Image (cartoon, grey):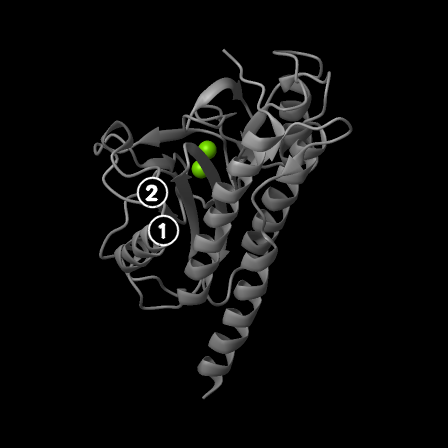
Amino acid sequence: MIYIRSKEEIEIIRKSALMVSATLTEVAKLLKPGITTLSIDKMAETFIRDNGGVPSFKGYNGFPFSLCISVNEVVVHGFPSSYELKDGDIISVDCGFYKNGYHGDSAYTFGIGNLKPEVIKLLQVTKESVYRGVAQAKDNNRVGDISFAVENYTFKENGYGVVRELVGHGVGRNLHEDPQVPNYGKRGDGKRLKTGMVLAIEPMINLGKKEVYTLKDGWTVVTNDKKPSAHFEHTTAVGKDAGEPLSSFKVIEIAEKANSELNSSYYTL
Ligand code: MG
Ligand code: MG
């Protein structure tokens, strides 16, 4: 069942999605070498609850934390832990916010300190690929048009591995709804898109090969070749001429930039 949301429902989903963006902005402000991923999760849960929301992920199929925090070769669903971030790490933070009956779902991959140029490019291309997908989320297109746009840009144009085992999804009253939105596929394939559908578009892109496996904890997904992986996600409303992101990276990017300037001045002391 694929739901068509009213304008009023989409505004409620937008509020939840923007609260995810606000949470990820708070994460951006905290990031620096030496902090643990568990402390980031604790801060985020407090922030979400202080804003009247519930962390969508906590308890979802037994997931024990508020955020998925996936460092370097971890693709998605990483557990926050006592691991201390270090210079050169990348950290994918996936967050869900539930309030007034609707979820928002968004993810962002941050760099810690100085990254290798090849890793910076992976982040840039993965972020851009979300927007390639969003542009195809328009009335009368098909899910495969989104999938093709993401795969074409990340794999065919840039040679990255596109994770197949995990996909985007509808989002609304439930965190995961129909349809599935793979990050690979053919133009014109799959379910037809209609204005008012709300989709989480979320490329998971590997610097190396596409193959992944799941650790014994049953959650943590890791690249087979142990090369880094990036993940960006927007909750997106299907529109007449293009999709409209309901989450926003704008404030996250401002905080990310300010934080990196702060930390680079710290390094030069
Ligand atoms: Mg997500
Ligand atoms: Mg999602």
Foreground pick, 259 / 192: 192
Residue plotted at (31% across, 51% down):
45
Q: Is residue 231 visible?
A: no
Query: Is label 1's Cβ within 8 Å of ligand 1?
Result: no
Residue 7 appears at what percent x and percent y? Answer: 62, 30
Quadrant of the picture in which ligand 1 is shown: top left
Q: What residue type is labelled 1?
A: Ile
Query: Is residue 173 shown above or below 202?
Result: above
Query: Is residue 79 shown above or below 199?
Result: below
Q: Tell me if 207 is positioned left or right of 70 in this view.
A: right
Residue labelled with disc 2: 55
Q: Do the residues labelled 1 and 2 touch (CB within 8 Å)?
A: yes
Element marked by disc 2: strand
Farthest bottom residue?
269
Residue labelled with disc 1: 48
Foreground pick, 88 / 127: 127
